[in-house]
Amino acid sequence: FRVAGINCFDQGDFSPVSEFKTCQPGFPGAPSAVKITKANDSVHITWEAPPSPSGRILEYSMYMARPGQMAFIRIYRGTKMSCSVSSTHLDNAHIDCSASNRPAVVFRIAPRTNRATAPATQIRWIQGRGCDLSPLPDYEIEESFF
C-alpha cells in the first residue's frame, strides 16, 4: 500500500510502497478475554476463542512455567475454553520476578486448528506481593504474544 496526505490545500506525495501482514497466514489468532479466578485449592482460567481462528479450532493447550529457566509444562489440552489448575501444580510453578518487582505465575495458551498451532499467548498472573515481599495490588493479568 501507499499513503498520501490530503488537506484543503492539496494532496501530498505518495509514500514508498509498504507491505505488512496482521498475522501469519493459516495460523489462528490469539485467545482473548483471559480471566483467572482464584478458589481455595485451585485457580480457574477462562478465555474466548480467537476473533480470527483461520479454520476450526480443534483444541487448546495451556502451559505453566516451571522452575528452571522458564521451562513450560502442559497442564491442559482439550476443546473447552477453560481449565482449572490445582494448588499442587501452583505450588510447583515458577514465580517470575523479572518484570520490575512484579512477581507472576506465567501461563501460555495456544489454539490449534486443522491447519496449524498458533504461537502461544503468554499470561502473567501478577501475585499479591513483590519479589521483595512488599504489598502489591491484588491479582492482575498481563498478556503478551509469542
Image (cartoon, grey):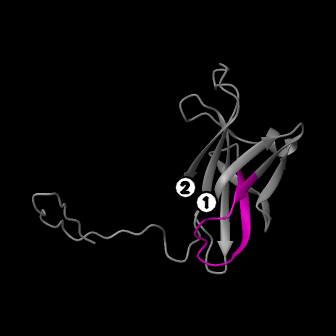
The amino acid type, in three-letter code, at marker 2 is Phe
As drawn, 132 above or below 7:
above
Q: Name the residue: 18% across, 61% down.
A: 6
Classed neighbour count for the residue bearing mark 2: other residues with Cα under 10 Å, few (<14), some (14–19), many (≥20) = few
Tell which of 13 and 134 is nearer to you. 13
Q: Are marks 1 and 2 in contact (CB under 8 Å)?
A: yes
Q: Name the residue: 62% across, 80% down.
A: 115
Q: Is residue 141 left or right of residue 85?
A: left
- Quarter of the C terminus within the rendering: bottom right
Q: Residue furthest top?
A: 134
For marks 1 and 2, the one nearer the N-term is: 1
Tell which of 111 and 10 is nearer to you. 10
The x, y position of residue 60, in whole percent, is 72, 65
Magenta-highlighted residues: 46-64
As drawn, 26 above or below 109:
below
Image quadrant where residue 133 sits: top right
Q: Is residue 92 visible?
A: no
SS for dot 1:
loop
Q: Name the residue: 69% across, 32% down.
A: 127
Image quadrant where residue 63 sits: bottom right
Find residue 141 and name its label.
none
SS for dot 2:
strand
Q: Is residue 3 left or right of residue 122?
A: left
Q: Is residue 12 left or right of residue 107?
A: left
Q: Which residue is mark 1?
A: 120
Tell which of 90 and 11 is nearer to you. 11
- Quarter of the N terminus within the rendering: bottom left
Kindly report the distance in space between the C-alpha atoms of the residues bearing marks 1 and 2.
Answer: 6 Å
Q: Is residue 125 visible?
A: yes
The x, y position of residue 96, in whole percent, is 63, 38
Q: Residue furthest left?
A: 9
Q: Which residue is mark 2?
A: 145
